[in-house]
Image: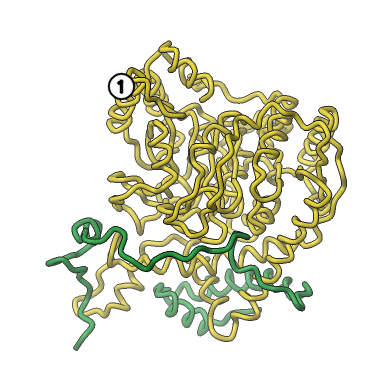
Chain colours: A yellow, B green
Amino acid sequence: MTDLTSLTIAAARDKLANKEFTALELTEAHLEAMDKSKDLNAFITTTADLARARAKESDARFQRGTAGALEGIPLGIKDLFCTEGVETTAGSHILEGFKPPYESTVSQKLRDGGAVMLGKLNMDEFAMGSSNLSSYFGPVKNPWKAKNRDGDLVPGGSSGGSAAAVAGHLVMGATGTDTGGSIRQPASFCGIVGVKPTYGRCSRWGIVAFASSLDQAGPMTRNVRDAAIMLTVMCGHDPKDSTSAPLAVPDFEAALGQGVKGLRIGIPKEYRPEGLNGEVAALWDKGIQWLKAAGATPVEISLPHTKSALPTYYIVAPAEASSNLARYDGVRFGLRERGLLGDSLDSMYSKTRAAGFGTEVKRRILIGTYVLSAGYYDAYYLKAQKVRALIAKDFTDAFDKVDAILTPTAPTAAFGLDDKQDDPIAMYLNDVFTVPASLAGIPGASVPAGLNSEGLPLGLQVLTKRWDEETMFRVCQVLEEAANFPSLKARP
Amino acid sequence: MSLDNATIRRIATLARIEVPAAELEAAAAKLSGILSWIEQLREVNTDNVTPMSGGTDLKLPWRADIVTEGGQPDQVLANAPEAHGGFFVVPKVVE
């Protein structure tokens, strides 16, 4: 049955409908693959029994003719999504043991669509990171290996467990979340497709909050069509999230196959800084040629505030995080560190948070607290909000001239799990190409487009204007067809 | 921008995160490095720019201020490290 893990979501959907195999067989094949790939550490929690029960329910719905859009499709859920009765940790010690009594809106929509959850995927603690090295539950390994070089590689982050599980054929697709690149960068590192929709497309309700004005959920899959299928199910208005858009959700799969003839593709000159990795630059040029050959017109554009995006992000995101993470106080859920008898409430808070949060999370809470503190608010936070407005305007102006923008997803391929990582700013630079779109709230996707000289995946990023994921998917599909990317085979 | 130990101690108190004295120096160095890097934003002219305070361009909706899912104390308390008689238990706060 191992070949069941090689199928795309689209193919499995059709074969399930044709009764070529059952949902339970499909789930069992993936549970077996998960079992064989424990070395990747992609999952924090596995839910095999729940998965079998839900797969049986899917088979019953196939019998009754009431199958949903993702009926019987085995998926992984990032451990940032609250899942009813199933431990949800956000990759943090402070939430260890937390079993939400409710289901996040996005994972509920996937359940309602018939998807079968196989488990909760590992991630950087509170989605803060680009390597998965900050997970309390240990790093995830990238299923890709470099040619001619030993050692494990990071899967990227923060949705690194999601990316590794999809690339390694442990699941057919996974949910991710993206605050500054946390879907797109790991997708690029693991050679899969990752989509961050427009801010407001997916409800944030029930997703552990990091930076609320930036957080968006999205699908991670092995091809563009599967991402379109998953995203259509995940999106939609939710009154429980005031920033969820009350807009009709297009059938994103229906947008595929229209090609890019006549589209104008923006090539931002600021994304080609001096010192850009030569292989990344060459792949970007190839991508431009592929779109040109398919009938699109490349147009050089300028996004003048690009270089301000990362420092802006590292004010806005920590500021929001310091506020959002104030709730982890040892009172309502998760860890409580007791001090000496007679210790104050404040002391209990401080001890709990010192013991429960990891280094990077503490660092961001402290930065966020500082930039919001009296006397510094205007100089840092308000300033960043103004620069953010300028970054968003750069994109608005650009989309007057072009229909989509093509850039590299990340400045490098996956790096080594054991590479020394003690400079936070060097780590932040992983997201230099993804953060601007997050600040602007526009949709972005990463498509695997080629391998570097070490045989490691590199992705290209496609951006479009707000609410125009359909154009984004069209461009992605043309890139996918032209790239003919050598995806990993199911692991033996 | 360089943060001294006293500033780190003050921020850590505001954030309710205990930072051991031995770690103050290292924390100050890392945070100062990040803040110095952030300072480059000062070069950007933001005169007459309206700050962007959220991620959406849509108008935020009003909603009725009513209880939607109340009356579930057991579920609310289910994950509490310590609960008693329908309440969260915390260290004594009144002398």
Neighbour tally class for label 1: few under 14, some 14-19, many 20 plus, Cα within 10 Å: some
Please report the residue visible at 39 percent of the width from the left and 66 percent of the height from the top.
B64
Instruction: State the quadrant of the C terminus of chain B.
Output: bottom left
Instruction: State the quadrant of the N terminus of chain B.
Output: bottom right
Q: Residue furthest left?
A: B85
- Residue placed most toward the observer, A215 or A414: A215
Q: Residue A270: x and y, percent?
A: 81, 54
Answer above or below: position of A289 versus B13: above
Answer above or below: position of B1 versus A420: below
Please report the residue visible at 25 percent of the width from the left and 73 percent of the height from the top.
A339
Q: Secondary structure at mark 1?
A: helix
Residue B46 appears in the figure:
yes
Residue type, label 1: Ala
Q: Chain of mark 1?
A: A
Q: As drawn, is B49 to the left or to the right of B91?
A: right
Q: Residue A280: x and y, percent?
A: 76, 40
Residue under circle 1?
A60
- Residue placed most toward the observer, B14 or B24: B14
Q: Residue A76: x and y, percent?
A: 43, 36
Q: Quadrant of residue A143?
A: top right
Answer above or below: position of A219 versus A105: above
Q: Residue A456: x and y, percent?
A: 66, 33
Please report the residue visible at 85 percent of the width from the left and 51 percent of the height from the top.
A301
Q: Quadrant of residue A152?
A: top right
Answer above or below: position of A178 versus B12: above
